[in-house]
Amino acid sequence: MARQKNVSQMKPGEVGIVAGFTDDHLSVKLMEMGCLPGAAVRFNFTAPFGDPVCISVSGYELSLRLEEAATISILN
């Protein structure tokens, strides 16, 4: 069974599917950047001090603050 968590909890190399968002206002911005429900997201790496994080989604790399990444629910 798939387990739901958020992007900020992912480990480098881990892949998940965007399930939804916990922040309605921020979700519009994230969807405009390609984080659409059902899209595959790959966690690439965390910056040296832990923030921001780099993910791959919709064919490109995206840097997000941890607080933004935490609003993206994923299934893995």
Image (cartoon, rainbow, N blue to C red):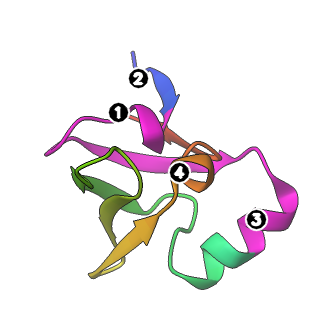
Image check: 32 left or right of 35? right
Distance from Cα at disc 1 to Cα at disc 2? 6 Å
Q: Say whether residue 26 is magenta.
A: yes
Query: Residue at position x 34%, y 44% from top?
Result: 50
Question: Residue 44: where, in percent of width, then height?
Answer: 20, 56
Distance from Cα at disc 4 to Cα at disc 1? 15 Å
Query: Residue at position x 52%, y 58% from top?
Result: 65
Q: Secondary structure at mark 4?
A: helix
Q: Nearer the viewer, mark 1 or mark 3?
A: 3
Chain-order first, disc 4 or disc 3: 3
Chain-order first, disc 4 or disc 1: 4
Quarter holding residue 53 = bottom left
Q: What's the magenta region?
A: 6-28
Quarter holding residue 31 = bottom right
Image check: 56 left or right of 24? left
Q: Say whether residue 56 is magenta.
A: no
Name the disc covering residue 2, or none: 2
Question: Residue 25: where, in percent of width, then height?
Answer: 86, 65
Name the residue tied to disc 3. Answer: 26
Q: Are marks 1 and 3 in contact (CB under 8 Å)?
A: no
Amino acid at pointer 3 = Leu
Name the residue tied to disc 1. Answer: 76
Amino acid at pointer 1 = Asn
